[in-house]
Image (cartoon, rainbow, N blue to C red):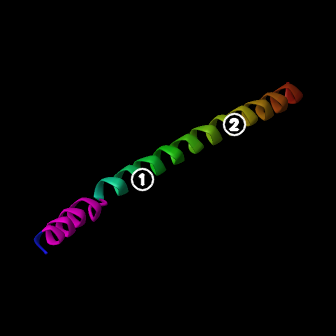
Amino acid sequence: MTQYHFLRTWLTAHIGNERGAALVEYALLVALIAVVCIGAITFLGNSADTKFSNVGSQLG
């Protein structure tokens, strides 16, 4: 019975601790959001530059 109790306590202490895993998941989520934002800004910036150049050439 003592070995079972020790094993149960050890497993609960090591498996029950998900704090580090949650932190890694949040960090990956923030990194993914940053990559998507950078990609969207780059794409929209190039599109806006093209539009402004076309309007400027038509006006001038």
Q: Residue at x 62, y 38 (%)?
A: 39
Q: Which residues are magenta?
A: 3-18
Report the quarter where the N terminus lies. bottom left
The foreground one among 14 and 54 is: 14
Which label sits in the foreground, 2 or 1? 1
Q: Is residue 2 left or right of residue 60?
A: left
- Quarter of image, res 36: top right
> Is 41 rendered above or below residue 2?
above
**Residue that numbered label 1 is attached to:** 25
Q: Residue at x 83, y 33 (%)?
A: 55
Q: Is residue 35 left or right of residue 8?
A: right
Q: Is residue 31 left or right of residue 6?
A: right
Report helix, strand or loop for mark 2.
helix
Report the quarter where the C terminus lies. top right
**Residue that numbered label 2 is attached to:** 43
Q: Position of residue 5 (x, y in %)?
A: 15, 72
Q: Position of residue 10 (x, y in %)?
A: 19, 62
Q: Is residue 25 left or right of residue 14?
A: right
The foreground one among 45 and 16 is: 16
